[in-house]
């Protein structure tokens, strides 16, 4: 295939050692929960293209909305100009949020959405005249992006950014307060260092790229109480967990608490176009209001609030309102629990866990992820193992038979091993 062979000499793939990386699989088209390859093979997608395609691929309602927007206004700068899709989307997102989470700042990727959240939390302190509170407390096992600012709040030991120690701004990272020892350590840290903190950030209920590690809603309630006690902004990074992935529209709803800032991306557009949002409370927004331009939030990605992305996001929200996605997610969850549980008895399996439409089989080790991925492809599924886990995050509306092909492929490959 000439375009693949020619382009291979020029592309730089994500998370890949290019000297040893195999050629990627050439895709001809996508439809529903399936990826159609150029060579005629068809794969059931078990990870919804990095957790984005929550309605499956090529949903006609989203496709029609994007085409219609393309014909009207494909893009226009957001500085000084306005367009209906963005303003409508901001209104709808604010309506989905509890409390005073009313101000929406659009960006074009999840990492940048988190960068903006950090910037808001820190600059709000500066605008109040609090010069010493400029640190962000993060948690062991967390992952919030690959840009410089977000790398600094990822797990510095277990994450993929260890080699950048010394370049990145130093941010405190402590274990999530989930048991007696970690709760004591968390409280002691805050007693000693809260005066240096502007905010703390967490992925609610599940740390995704950290290994799909789950924690109870009580952890979020504990963080909210601590943030209130010490006067910190609480940031919930729902880039992975938002839009039905954990069984509720947003993961934090299961804890009954409200963050000061929430970041959204991935499934925001139904996996169609890049778009992200950082949503802050009216109180934080108020810290940027004055007669001085110096207190304004000086951030503005070129493609922020791209009209086609916003049109796709509005169409995706239509689907959540008009189709039974959360009910379907509950069905996916029940089937994942039922069909992945037999893996627990296989040699080399450390754990099996399910939360919402997330299914995880954790192994003692994965010696060669590429070989394991090839074995899964041979069984007709697209599953991308990482670290020590095989995980499924399929479209929320995946059919029972397609989902069984995914769980069956995982069980079959692990049985062979």
Image (tube, rainbow, N blue to C red):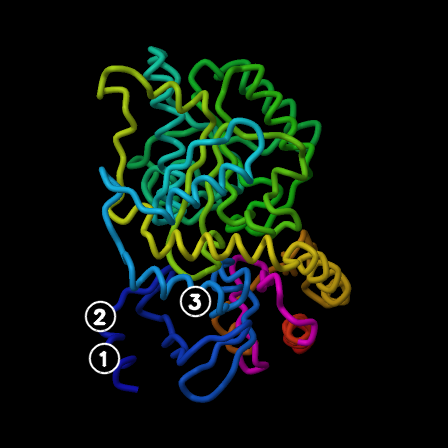
Q: Earlier in the sequence, mark 1 or mark 3?
A: 1
> Which is more toward the observer, 142 or 301?
301
Name the residue tied to disc 3.
Answer: 63
Classified by dominant secondary structure, the portion drawn in magenta counts as loop
First to last magenta residue range: 377-401
Name above or below for residue 388 compared with residue 170.
below
**Measured from the top left, where is residue 252 in percent x and y?**
61, 38
Q: Quadrant of the C terminus?
A: bottom right
The circle drawn on residue 10 is 2
Tags 3 and 2 touching, CB below 8 Å: no
Q: Real-space Cα distance between discs 1 and 2?
A: 8 Å
Left or right side of 281 for 86: left
Name the residue tied to disc 1.
Answer: 6
Name above or below for residue 113 compared with residue 320.
above
Residue at (38%, 75%) from the top-left corner? 24
Left or right side of 233 for 355: right
Q: Quadrant of residue 353?
A: bottom right
Tags 1 and 3 touching, CB below 8 Å: no
Crowd around label 1: few <14 · some 14–19 · many ≥20 (10 Å): few
Tags 1 and 2 touching, CB below 8 Å: yes
The circle drawn on residue 271 is none
Crowd around label 2: few <14 · some 14–19 · many ≥20 (10 Å): few
């Amino acid at each position: 295939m000439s375009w693949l062979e020619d382009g291979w000499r020029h592309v730089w793939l994500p998370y890949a050692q290019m000297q040893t990386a195999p050629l990627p699989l050439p895709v001809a088209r996508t439809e529903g929960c399936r990826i159609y390859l150029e060579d005629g093979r068809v794969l059931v997608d078990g990870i919804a293209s990095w957790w984005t395609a929550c309605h499956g691929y090529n949903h006609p309602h989203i496709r029609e909305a994007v085409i219609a927007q393309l014909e009207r206004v494909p893009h226009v700068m957001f500085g000084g100009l306005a367009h209906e899709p963005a303003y409508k989307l901001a209104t709808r997102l604010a309506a989905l949020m509890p409390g005073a989470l009313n101000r929406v700042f659009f960006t074009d990727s999840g990492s940048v959405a988190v960068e903006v959240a950090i910037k808001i939390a820190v600059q709000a302190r500066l605008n109040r005249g609090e010069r010493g509170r400029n640190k962000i407390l993060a948690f062991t096992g967390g992952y919030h992006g690959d840009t410089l600012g977000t790398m600094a709040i990822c797990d510095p030991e277990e994450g993929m950014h260890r080699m950048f120690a010394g370049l990145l701004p130093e941010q405190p990272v402590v274990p999530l307060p989930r048991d007696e020892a970690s709760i004591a350590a968390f409280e002691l840290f805050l007693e000693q260092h809260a005066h240096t903190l502007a905010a703390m950030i967490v992925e609610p209920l599940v740390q995704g790229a950290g290994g799909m590690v789950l924690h109870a809603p009580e952890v979020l309630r504990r963080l909210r109480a601590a943030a209130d006690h010490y006067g910190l902004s609480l940031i919930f990074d729902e880039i992975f967990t938002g839009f039905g992935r954990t069984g509720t529209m947003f993961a934090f709803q299961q804890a009954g608490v409200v963050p000061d800032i929430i970041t959204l991306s991935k499934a925001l557009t139904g996996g169609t176009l890049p778009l992200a949002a950082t949503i802050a409370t009216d109180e934080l927004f108020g810290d940027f209001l004055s007669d001085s331009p110096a207190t304004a939030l000086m951030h503005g990605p070129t493609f922020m609030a791209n009209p086609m992305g916003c049109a796709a996001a509005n169409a995706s929200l239509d689907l959540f309102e008009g189709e039974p996605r959360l009910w379907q997610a509950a069905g996916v969850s029940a089937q994942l629990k039922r069909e992945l549980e037999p893996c627990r008895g296989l040699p080399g399996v450390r754990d099996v866990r399910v939360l919402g439409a997330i299914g995880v089989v954790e192994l003692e080790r994965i010696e060669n992820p590429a070989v394991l991925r090839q074995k899964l492809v041979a069984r007709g599924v697209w599953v991308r193992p990482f670290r020590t886990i095989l995980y499924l995050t399929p479209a929320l509306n995946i059919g029972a038979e397609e989902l069984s092909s995914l769980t069956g492929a995982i069980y079959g490959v692990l049985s062979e091993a």
